[in-house]
Amino acid sequence: MRAEFVVIGAGPAGLAAALAASARGVRVVLVDAAPAPGGQFHRQPAAGLGARRPEALHHRWRTWERLRDGLAAGSVRTLTDHHVWCVERTPDGFTVHALTGPGQEEPAEVRAPAVLLATGGYETVLPFPGWTLPGVVTAGGAQAMLKGSLVAPGHRAVVAGSGPLLLPVATGLAAAGVEVAALVESTAPGRLVRHGRALAGKLPEGAGYAARLLRHRVPVLPRHTVVRAHGDDRVTGVTVAALGPDGHVRSGTERDLACDTLAVGHGMLPHTDLAESLGCRLDGLAVAVDDEQRTDVPGVWAAGEATGIGGAALALAEGHIAGCSAAARLRGTAPDPAPAALKARTRLGRSAAALDSACAPPAHWAGQLTDDTVVCRCEEVTAGAVRAALDLGAGDERTVKLLTRAGMGWCQGRMCSPAVAGLAGRAPGPARRPFARPVPLGVLARHDPQEGLS
């Protein structure tokens, strides 16, 4: 299949970009792995579930309606259930390689001179004793169960970790009838106050979440953390404790909370696999872009969480700017993004940076890990094994991986990489994965050897 502009990812950034480019006469193909557009933020329940009020589980429903209706009325061709594993450079542009079918084993290709990477981000969960028990889910996973399947993960839940995602998860669970025993947030309120000017625009949203927490009588424990989860066959409770000013657990503050679900998350990381394989420059862990959302690889744009975690509103603004830029470059005209999008990107970018600075996980979380705590779930590598590798001289994630197999499993380090880096006393580094997802050997074998994979 051929197009002028391929947008990878149908979340807020990808939808905004596709609509902006299509409105300017560009032939756009929108590719996404999910069964329907929307991304995680606008994830929709399957039609067969008969949801009577899906808007009850969603924030900014009217924005989603505008995006949905624009997609239905426009000329964007949408390819759902397409799992992109590689974007290949070719003499006339790019070939997007995807997997389709029930087993994700059938190859599909889209060729175009321009590509937008709106690949989103993925959650970070720092391990603790008991985090592998059934009933412990990521915060985003609990939200996806509610939005996509109309299923509550349990009857009594604790929502814990750090970052703004915890608020919609806790209020969403409570609204669905789940008893939320506590919202356990490691961030101290004072850290947010110090960024008050940058976060002023977030006050109405924050006040709305606070009102809902009060309405559902959800206790909030700021400057606390989960020390361990308890249970045999599944989680039956958690121990939480207060954190001191230095980030250490304060002795004597531990308390047990009964629950059958723990929804935990410690922020998000940009999904940069496709960008890295194309050779795009990174700024820290995010894809580096210019004022038009262009990467340093000609013909490649990036927007949304891949360029830095900032939320749906910022992703919409970046996507619109990227779509306008791509259309202009393809047509040889000047970009014409809406001034409101440019202003929103600046304002929301400042808020995102402030939240990122304020909502840091506990500084000394690694010290709470017992040696038998599993760090890499795919390969069942424990914290003790990682520490042993460090004692042997390993100083980075790659060396630990070679000595312990941590990060060699199905997820290729997406879950365990931040934990391994933290145990090594380092910040997480770029992943440098050759493919964005596992690929059957049969698909690679059928690839034209005359073309190769760049």
Image: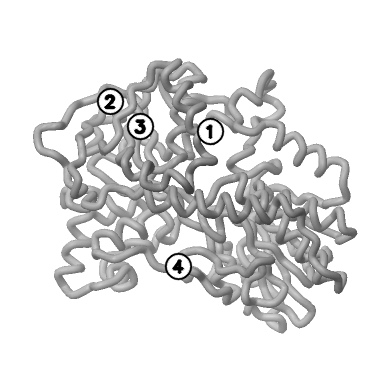
8 and 322: which one is in front?
322
The spot of residue 430 in percent (x, y) is 44, 68
Q: Which mark is residue 236?
A: 2
Amino acid type of disc 2? Answer: Thr
Mark whose residue sits in front, 1 or 2? 1
Q: Earlier in the sequence, mark 2 or mark 4?
A: 2
- Colour style of the rendered protein structure: one colour
**Type of the residue with mark 4:** Gly
Could you classify mark 1 by the number of other residues whose Cα lies within 10 Å: few (under 14), some (14-19), or many (20 or more)? few
Name the foreground residue: 201 vs 3. Answer: 201
Q: Amino acid at mark 3?
A: Leu
Per the image, the residue denoted by label 4 is 284
Mark 2–mark 4 distance (CA, rounded to whole Å): 39 Å
**Closer to us: mark 4 or mark 1?**
1
Q: Amino acid at mark 1?
A: Glu
- Mark 4 and mark 1 lie on one chain; the one further toward the N terminus is 1
- Would you name the residue on which mark 3 appears? 262
Q: Which of labels 3 and 4 is toward the front?
A: 4
Mark 3 surroundings: few (<14), some (14-19) or many (≥20) residues within 10 A: many
Q: Secondary structure under badge 4?
A: loop
The answer, for residue 135, to whether it is visible in the render is no
Residue at the image point whose x is 43% and y is 43% from the top: 196
Which residue is at the front of the view, 293 or 338? Answer: 338
Instruction: Single out the mark in the foreground, 2 or 4.
Output: 4
Residue indicated by mark 1 = 205
Residue found at the very far left of the displayed protein: 252
Q: CA distance from mark 3 to mark 2?
A: 9 Å
Q: Is residue 222 above or below residue 337?
A: above
Q: Is residue 325 shown to the viewer in this render?
A: yes
Mark 1 near mark 3, Cβ–Cβ under 8 Å? no
